[in-house]
Each structure stands twice: as structure tokens, then as C-alpha cells.
Amino acid sequence: MYSQRPQPLQFSWLAILFCVLFAINLLGGMAHAETADVVNEARQEELKHLLRHDCGSCHGMTLKGGLGPALSKQRLADKPDDFITYTILYGRTGTAMPPWQGILSEADARWLATYIKANGPEKGDQ
Ligand code: HEC
């Protein structure tokens, strides 16, 4: 009679252990999936640097325009995010706008597109 008591208790501890392991596994999987198309903070800094120096060589250091047009909020406001993203990724055939695929992932290009639309030329320099 006494010897049967501990059994249910042992079973529930095992069940909890399995649940915890399962949850950790699930969370780990989710974190891993995220890294594929989320632009983390370090990458965002790299992209801002690229925008100023590489894109800036044509669009102007402050993106007010040069060889390429100004990348201002006002000019881009009515252009869809996809359109800007794909312009960045694939360039514009027959113009100086080069394709950035290979250097930038689609997530990078999309982040840049929304960043440019939100910020445009640097503040105080418009
Ligand atoms: C070698 C010069 C050059 C470089 C470098 C360059 N661009 Fe361009 N870009 C252009 C030109 C020229 C155009 C205009 C193309 C046209 O006439 O449609 C353009 C167009 C664009 C457009 C479309 C603007 C609009 O109003 O439709 C976007 C967005 C853009 N560039 C973003 C970028 C970004 C972001 C980078 C850096 C990752 C970059 N460009 C680097 C020359 C350049």
C-alpha cells in the first residue's frame, strides 16, 4: 500500500521535465527561424553606414541627390515599399542604379526601403 505512493509523483516530475525540454526546444527553433529575415541592430548600423557611404556616392552623402535622385520622404512617399525594395535589390536596367543583391539580403533591402521612407535625408540638412 505504501510502496505505491511515490509512483504518481515521479511520473508528474518526468512529465514536467519533458514539457520544459519541449518548450526550450520550441523556443530555440523559433529564435533560429527569426535570424533568417530579421535585421538585427548590428546589421542596421552596417546598413546605415552603407547608405551614407555607398548609396551616398550617387544619391549624395545626405541623400539629397547627385547622380541618383534624392531619396527623400516626399519623393518616395507614394512609391510602394516593394517597388523601392526591388529597385535596391535588382537595380534599374539602363541607369546607373546598380543591383545590390548578393551584398544585401531581401530583408536588408526592405529594411533600407522603410528606413529611407521614414527618414529621408538627414535631419538638419534638408
Ligand atoms: C552608381 C550610382 C548609384 C548607387 C551607388 C546607388 N544608386 Fe540608387 N539610383 C541611382 C540612379 C541613377 C537612380 C535613378 C534610376 C532611374 O532613373 O530610374 C537610382 C534610383 C534609386 C531609387 C529609386 C528612386 C525613385 O524615386 O524611384 C532608390 C530607392 C535607390 N536608388 C536606392 C539606392 C540605395 C538604397 C543604394 C545603396 C544601397 C543606391 N541606390 C545606390 C544611382 C545609384
Image (spheres, rainbow, N blue to C red):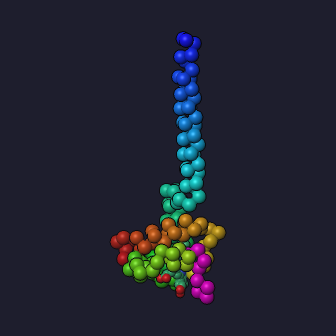
Considering the image in quadrants, where does the N terminus appear?
top right
Regarding residue 60, the answer to whether it shows in the image is no
Q: Residue furthest right?
A: 102
The part of the image, by quadrant, that contains residue 14 is: top right
Seen in the picture, residue 14 relative to 70 is either above or below; the reply is above
**Residue 17 to residue 111: above or below:** above
In the rendered image of this protein, does residue 67 appear above or below residue 27?
below
State the quadrant of the C terminus: bottom left
Residue 6 painted magenta = no
Residue in front for this viewpoint, 81 or 40 = 81
Q: Residue lying at the far front in this picture: please name it.
A: 1
On the question of residue 69 being in view, the answer is: yes
Residue at 53% across / 32% down in the picture? 16
Where's residue 65, x and y in %?
46, 81
Q: Where's residue 116, x and y in %?
A: 45, 72
Query: Does residue 71 appear to the left or right of 108 in the view shown?
Result: left
Magenta stretch, residue numbers: 88-96
Query: Where is residue 108 drawn, in percent x and y?
Result: 55, 66
Toward the top, the furthest residue is: 2
Decide whether residue 93 is among the magenta residues.
yes
Locate residue 109 relative to residue 123 in the image: left or right.
right
> Is 112 on the left or on the right of 104, as rendered?
left
Rendered residue at 59%/48% (across/down):
29
Secondary structure mainly formed by the magenta segment? loop
Residue nearest the viewer, comparing 65 with 91 = 91
**Residue with the most extreme bottom position:** 94
Residue shown at 58% from the left, 86% from the top:
95
